[in-house]
Amino acid sequence: MKEHQRYFPMVDGEGKLLPYFVCISNVVPKDRKVVVKGNEKVLRARLSDAAYFYQEDLKVPLAKRVDQLKKVVFQAKLGTSYEKMERFKQLASYTVQKIDPGLRGTVERVCLLCKADLVTGMVGEFPKLQGVVEGNTPGCRERRWT
């Protein structure tokens, strides 16, 4: 909403998102209602797309997406995103072993999943959501890390 359409979301006094937005136009429309309906239609379509990708992405756990990273080039001379994730995992594993060996499994799991969202439909459609997509759907957080 903010990136693609340059709308301003409305929030209440506590920062909670409200079902309203502000749109600024540099022209005076003949009929404001037509402009409002047009902007609502565009936003509704974008939100519908986001909901679709989100629901589809929940059908496949991130752990099952990791191998797809082997096809995502991170940087030509540095290899794929999968190889980058493996380097993260090695470095983090070494580091956590020195700090708190009991966390090694958790840290390695986080490293394994840290780039998996790159191959989701949501991040494919909305790249700025890389690494930040969460939900308040029951079980979402747990499912995301399975």
Image (cartoon, rainbow, N blue to C red):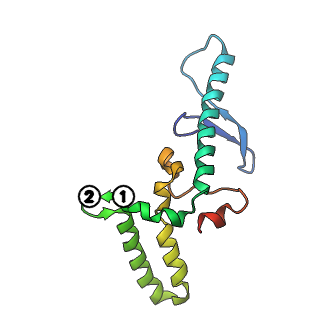
Q: Quadrant of the C terminus?
A: bottom right
User: In front here: 85 or 10?
Assistant: 85
Q: Quadrant of the N terminus?
A: top right
Q: Residues within 10 Å of mark 1 (few under 14, many from 20)?
A: few
Front disc: 1 or 2: 1
Residue that appears at 51% across and 64% down: 64
What amino acid type is highlighted by mark number 2? Ala
Report how far apart the C-alphas of labels 1 and 2 lie in the structure. Answer: 12 Å
Disc 1 element:
helix
Q: Position of residue 22 (x, y in %)?
A: 65, 32
Q: Position of residue 86 (x, y in %)?
A: 39, 72
Q: Position of residue 48 (x, y in %)?
A: 63, 39
* Residue 71, numbered label: 1
Q: Residues within 10 Å of mark 2 (few under 14, many from 20)?
A: few
Above or below: residue 143 compared with residue 13: below
Residue that appears at 75% across and 47% down: 13
Q: Position of residue 126 (x, y in %)?
A: 51, 45
